[in-house]
Image (cartoon, grey):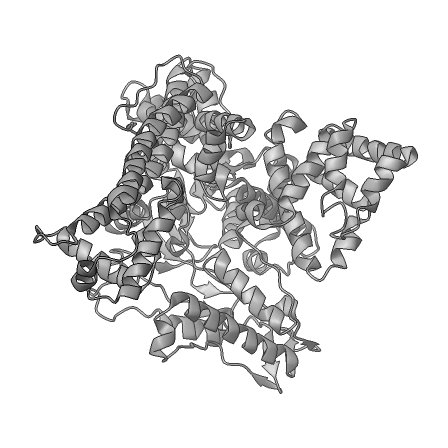
Amino acid sequence: MSHVSPPQAFHARTLPLQGLRLIEASAGTGKTYSIANLYLRLVLGMGPEQEALRVQEILVVTFTRAAAAELRSRIRSLLETAYHDLRASPPQSSHPFLAELLQGASADQCQRWRQRLYAALLDIDECSVSTIHSFALQLARSYLFESGTLADVTVSEGDGERPGRVLTDLYRQLALGANNFDQALLKSFSAHALKDFKRYYSRVSLGAELRLPSGLQFPPDLNLHQRLGLAQTHAAQQTQALATAFEALQGKWGATLAPDNDLPAELGEALDCSSAQIRSLYRFFATQLQGTLPEAKALGDSKSVPMKKLRARLALAGKSVPEPTPAQPFFDFAMRYEQLITQRAAAAQRQSSSLKAAVASLVQARMADMDPQEPSLDDLVRLLNQRLEDKRTGMALREQVLRAFPVCLVDEFQDTDPEQVKLFMQLYQGPSQQRAALLMIGDPKQSIYAFRGADLGNYLQVRAGVAAADGDQQGIYALDVNYRSKAALVAATNALFAEPPEPSAASIFGLDGMRYLPVQSCEALSPPHALGSLEQAGQDQAALILIGVDDPELCASKSRLERHYAADTAHRIAQLLNGDSQLRGAQQEASEPLCPGHIAVLVRNRQQSQRVQSALALHDIRAVQLGQRDSVFQTSVLAEDLYFVLAAIDAPDDRRRLRAALATPLMRGLDSDFAALRQFDQDEQTAERLMETFTACRAGWQQLGVLPAINQLLSEEQLHRRLAAHADGDRLLTDLRHLGELLQEQDSHCDAPEQLL
């Protein structure tokens, strides 16, 4: 293993704002806080050449739109705070970093800072804080489209890229299809149909080689359902051949093998079974051969002793040529039966593969037919890299970008993909970029976007390059103070993840170049930064408890072990809640009793979360599942109800849709009473009132989005109160909020309500 250079301690006031600077964070070490502080220094003129930068000249990029919005808000808030504090006489601040900057600052300097902050706040709505893809789109529009390097085409950000549009359209056609094989295809993608569908076919849309089942070809002019029909016919031909073979086996059984009265004694001798056991074998085959091949059971479905012996005999016969015995015809028959059952499973798999191949062929055809001039966002990043590499265009493009953005801060750098890293390195690395600065901030331990192309190995390669470079134009720094956790917990975590003392030893993470960097708690600072605490019977609790199981039988079953840990977790939480547990504030102010809302349980997946939730329910402790928000469509009982409700809002004059919405448990408040539906059918005034309510919600949807429309309906019909009164009300309301937020995010990309549906 190569030696990993230890980073320097990070100080926002002294960090050189030139060259390449890699800043490594850990959870709770103030990454966003530090980015805002560095931004403030640049605005005040504490960067390269002591020249103040306008907010339009400081580029800040991150990975998601939500993260960009948070950064923009934090930066604006800090600039406003700084401007307010500098207007005091004398200037003073309770903000730690501002207070540090003000120490020793002259009156003239404070006046200059105040003027620069005033100018920055006037332009703050024009600050360059965005996602990496938004930045690439901005570059393309500013420096490629306008210069004629790239044709002026339509490019959009988000889920509306070319593959996404094609796949969503095909999925919608399948969902609305009336053919059985449409539904069979969708079912093959499990409960997470749309997400799995897109994941499966995205590799085809990106140009992966398409492999069709033998003998299956799709003429180019066929539409989706014609292709599916051809695939179904192809699969049915193979299935019919198996059905014919099964019918022949049925005839052979009835003609030569089924005994009239006596069972062949030779079979009992060959299998070492009693006549009663042999009779059970015959009953099995007689029953299975009365139906069709799809209904027949495999030999392995029977756990009887004679069946086990028969399977052992057949397995032995498959490895060598058996000696002829009077019972051999029966063994040949059983072997053929098992072969047909195996081939039946393979045929079902081929049918699924044929249907998937039919869709894949159309995805590929659609992608080929689309305008090649329409680039995706990833295409733009690659195109920008090509232009930067080109000697004819690279230098001019680089100079234009550096004039516009002399300083760039990349947040969540560990989640960048190779092309994105290449883009920033080409722009900001090299002798001609000495006055520029590229500040890369991230935590490699939190790299979570590998499925989108994020490459942790690429991050480590950049780290190694920065560490190996000479001179003062690069450096690696660490945010090493945790502001969230107690000193005891930080010390325990450091001990748990402690790296081997030998530099050449393997990293605890198993990755060359990535090592655990110990941090200190803010409680250990001078002066200390106080945190609150959990006390039980007036005593602090242990910071970290590791719990194991020494029962070999329990450890042999993963599901039993998970249930055991869920029960143990629930028991410990119940003890905390039922005991004298108190939360005391950072300033030792009056304590408050511990309640369920103060406790979080972290799990690896939804199944574990459900087990913990069920275990807590046995102690009468209510809990809600957070996170995994994209799965709430598959797990919440309200998801389908909300679809029918939104369909009714989309067409409030359609009584059929309104009746379907009123019949849902959501609109009934989870009651078993269908009173609202009966009133709608029997009372015209009630019907008109509901139609007016849904019409008003549609107007709200068109003006403000789907989430306000949902909330408006819930308020009008008092559904929040009715759901909250339910035994599982907290979880249901949380699910409903998550569903609404996800729909609102998607709705922002739709031109009309029906597009969202």
Quarter of the rendering occupied by the C terminus:
top right
Pinpoint residue 738: horizontal percent, then vertical percent. 62, 48
Residue at image position (50%, 56%) is: 606
Quadrant position of residue 279:
bottom left
Q: Nearer the viewer, residue 111 or 630?
A: 630
Q: Nearer the viewer, residue 352 or 112?
A: 352
Q: Residue furthest front?
A: 261
Q: Nearer the viewer, residue 59 or 497?
A: 497
Quarter of the rendering occupied by the N terminus:
bottom left
Pinpoint residue 145: horizontal percent, then vertical percent. 45, 17
Residue at image position (60%, 73%) is: 532
Decide: is 543 above or below 142.
below
Q: Nearer the viewer, residue 189 or 302?
A: 302
Decide: is 145 above or below 537.
above
Q: Is residue 495 visible?
A: no
Residue at image position (37%, 43%) is: 454
- Horizontal side of residue 343 vs 540, given as left or right: left
- Horizontal side of residue 217 vs 134, given as left or right: left
Q: Is residue 272 visible?
A: yes
Decide: is 342 above or below 91.
above
Q: How many marks?
A: 0
Quadrant position of residue 241:
top left
Decide: is 59 above or below 383.
below
Pinpoint residue 632: horizontal percent, then vertical percent. 57, 48
Pinpoint residue 604: horizontal percent, then vertical percent. 45, 59
Residue at image position (77%, 45%) is: 714
